[in-house]
Image (cartoon, rainbow, N blue to C red):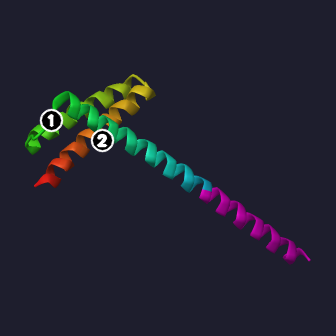
Amino acid sequence: MKSGKAISTNNESAETIETTETAEATLYAERQVFVLAAIEKEVSAQRTKWGVQKHNDQKWLAILMEEVGEAAKEINEDDDSKLRDELIQCAAVIVSWLKLWARY
């Protein structure tokens, strides 16, 4: 009888794990959509502000490092909302840099 109960518990545990994994995967997918949309929105905002940027790699790296420095500043100031914005700006610079490569 104990082994039957253990099997039942194992099945319930497996179902719980599967449900948890499905919920986590759904949450991850939702966050991914949100983050990628935020990055693309920032890419668009940067393009509106600065126009299409056609820098060499050294200039792109300088722009990125400036944004990374701003993210580091927000870490030091412990401001999560501003940190998120700065990280999105970093990602947007990288995306714009990569899009330039895709044109050639």
Give the secondary structure at mark 1: helix
- Which span of residues is magenta-colored? 1-22
Q: Position of residue 19 (x, y in %)?
A: 67, 59
Q: Which mark is nearer the camera, 2 or 1?
A: 2
Task: Say which element carries label 2.
Answer: helix
Q: Residue at x 61, y 54 (%)?
A: 23
Whether residue 87 is in magenta: the answer is: no
> Magenta stretch mostly in which secondary structure?
helix
Q: How far apart are marks 2 and 1 (CA)?
A: 14 Å
Residue 94, horizontal then vertical, whole percent: 24, 44
Up-down relation of residue 97 to residue 12 (above or below): above
Q: Upstream in the sequence, badge 2 or badge 1?
A: 1
In which quadrant of the rendered view does residue 76 lie? top left
Q: Name the residue under label 1.
A: 62
Could you tell me residue 100's position as x and y percent? 15, 48
Disc 1 crowd, CA 10 A, few/some/many (<14, 14-19, 20+): few
Question: What residue is rendered at 92% in x and 77% in y?
Answer: 1
Left or right, residue 83 beside residue 96: right
Determine which residue is flagged by label 2. Answer: 91
Report the amino acid beneath label 1. Answer: Ala
Q: What residue type is labelled 2?
A: Ala
* Image marks 2 and 1: residues in contact by CB distance under 8 Å: no
Give how far across and how far down residue 86 sits, in percent: 33, 31
Examine the rendered structure and indicate whether residue 66 appears above or below residue 100.
above
Label number found at residue 9: none
Vertical order, 35 against 104 (above or below):
above
* Residue situated furthest right in the rendering: 1
Q: What is the total number of numbered labels drawn onto the structure image?
A: 2
Screen quadrant of the C terminus: bottom left
Task: Kindly indicate the quadrant of the structure image that contains residue 49.
Answer: top left
